[in-house]
Image (cartoon, helix red, strand yellow):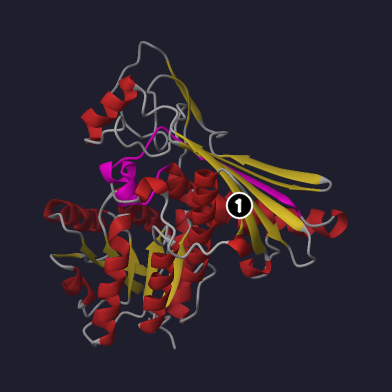
């Protein structure tokens, strides 16, 4: 049964109105068959500004609601996008399930931003709750839908793999100079440091590239994890003082990791090992956010970097201006030779991810990426954290990670 008639747009509501919500909103200008009809966040000014942005972009008649229950009761609503901070998502899902089961909400689908939860126990609760409510569900992992990833994977598996053999190594790196909001920097609120915040992208895009086209990602069996973490920059006195002044967070007392390296081993359909190698950092100072992806096989390799842009702008030292992110996300300079991402939402995969989710929900079908995948991602991340804490390889068959909490996220 379809959620929305294929003759009309899917009408969605946003839970959250921060940076990532606005990123998703901008991506919708490239998506057909969608209207944004409601938003809720606890800060009145932010939710009102978001509703105004919807109007400016001509994406719908958006009502700013003063409670989550009010948003869910909006009779025009078909689905919601959970884009609130990590520490709120389980409570949000509990409210959604309560309102749907009580008949006070008529939504039929939920999409949730990464990561699905801060622990494996909570991720499994998110999945149980959405299924208890009988809702379609999608996990918003944008990097799988980046055009370079989709096109590169298609070529490798169509041209190279049949002749030389399947790919066996995926490398994924994501680095920038640090998050936008204070809660990201706080281990207890965010659930970790850079490993949870950014490696959730890297491990899933790596697993996706290694999975045969059309096959379930469960065809790769998770075998083991090895990781190391460090705080390289933000606990140094100069940078800790800067972080405290800007974000109110004291990294001299309890820092989260700003660097993480992980190695995940899987067993493919034929019993052979394949590997995802991931690196993430909040200590990278370059032009801006850098995502580097590779896929390697017996006789071939695929490479992609978001900062190897076709468009570049040079500004001499005689040209000055305000700091901003008008050229690339997490921009670190306003002078010199600068790469320009002319469509960040499209290049990073947000546009195609939202297009896929919206069309799947309109047809009443499960999308390619669901809460099941979100649970799998959190399991991989918890295994990496435990490996880093213990200083040893974690064999998944030997460890129950259900109630594991990363050291940096444990109560003081």
The picture places residue 243, in percent across and down from the top left corner, at 28, 30
Inspect this view and state whether residue 335 appears.
Answer: yes
Does 129 sit above or below residue 18? below
Residue 401 vs 151, above or below: the answer is below
- Residue stretch rendered in magenta on the structure: 167-193
Badge 1 is on which residue?
225
State the residue at coordinates (29%, 21%).
321
Q: In the rendering, at what x and y percent does residue 215 appear?
A: 67, 70
Residue shown at 64% from the left, 55% from the top: 224
Instruction: Give residue 90's position: percent from left, percent from top.
Output: 32, 66
Q: Position of residue 266 (x, y in %)?
A: 68, 58
Magenta span includes 179: yes
How many discs mark residues in the rendered view? 1
Note whether 302 is above or below 332 in the view shown.
below
Residue 273 lies in magenta, yes or no? Answer: no
Looking at the figure, which quarter contains the N terminus?
bottom left
Please tell me whether mark 1 sits on a helix, a strand or a loop. strand
Q: Is residue 201 above or below residue 353?
A: above
């Amino acid at each position: 049964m379809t959620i929305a008639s294929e003759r009309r747009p899917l009408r969605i509501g946003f839970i959250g109105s921060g940076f990532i919500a606005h990123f998703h909103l901008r991506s919708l200008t490239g998506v057909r068959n969608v209207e944004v009809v409601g938003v809720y966040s606890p800060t009145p000014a932010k939710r009102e500004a978001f509703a105004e942005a919807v109007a400016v972009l001509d994406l719908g008649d958006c009502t700013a609601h003063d409670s989550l229950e009010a948003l869910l009761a909006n009779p025009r609503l078909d689905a919601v996008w959970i884009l609130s901070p990590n520490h709120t998502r389980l409570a949000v899902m509990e409210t959604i399930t309560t309102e749907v089961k009580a008949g006070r909400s008529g939504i039929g689908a939920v999409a949730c931003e990464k990561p699905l939860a801060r622990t494996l126990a909570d991720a499994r609760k998110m999945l149980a709750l959405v299924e208890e409510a009988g809702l379609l569900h999608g996990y918003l992992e944008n990097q799988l839908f980046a055009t370079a990833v989709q096109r590169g994977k298609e070529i490798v598996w169509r041209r190279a793999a049949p002749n030389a053999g399947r790919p066996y190594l995926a490398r994924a790196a994501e680095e920038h100079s640090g998050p936008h909001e204070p809660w990201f920097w706080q281990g207890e609120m965010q659930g970790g440091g850079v490993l949870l915040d950014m490696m959730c992208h890297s491990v899933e895009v790596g697993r996706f590239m290694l999975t045969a086209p059309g096959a379930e990602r469960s065809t790769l069996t998770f075998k083991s994890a090895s990781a190391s973490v460090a705080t390289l920059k933000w606990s140094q006195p100069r940078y800790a003082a800067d972080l405290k002044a800007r974000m109110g967070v004291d990294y001299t007392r309890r820092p989260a990791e700003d660097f993480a390296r992980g190695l995940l081993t899987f067993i493919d359909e034929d019993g052979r090992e394949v590997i995802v190698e991931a690196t993430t950092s909040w200590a990278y100072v370059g032009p801006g956010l850098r995502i580097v992806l590779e896929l390697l096989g017996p006789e071939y390799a695929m490479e992609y970097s978001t900062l190897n842009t076709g468009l570049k702008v040079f500004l001499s030292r005689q040209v000055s201006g305000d700091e901003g992110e008008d050229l690339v996300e997490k921009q670190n300079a306003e002078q010199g030779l600068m790469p320009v991402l002319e469509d960040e939402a499209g290049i990073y995969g947000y546009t195609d991810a939202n297009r896929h989710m919206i069309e799947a929900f309109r047809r009443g079908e499960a999308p390619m990426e669901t809460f099941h995948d979100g649970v799998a991602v959190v399991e991989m991340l918890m295994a990496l954290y435990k490996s880093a804490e213990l200083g040893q390889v974690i064999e998944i068959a030997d460890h129950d990670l259900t109630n594991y909490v990363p050291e940096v996220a444990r109560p003081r």
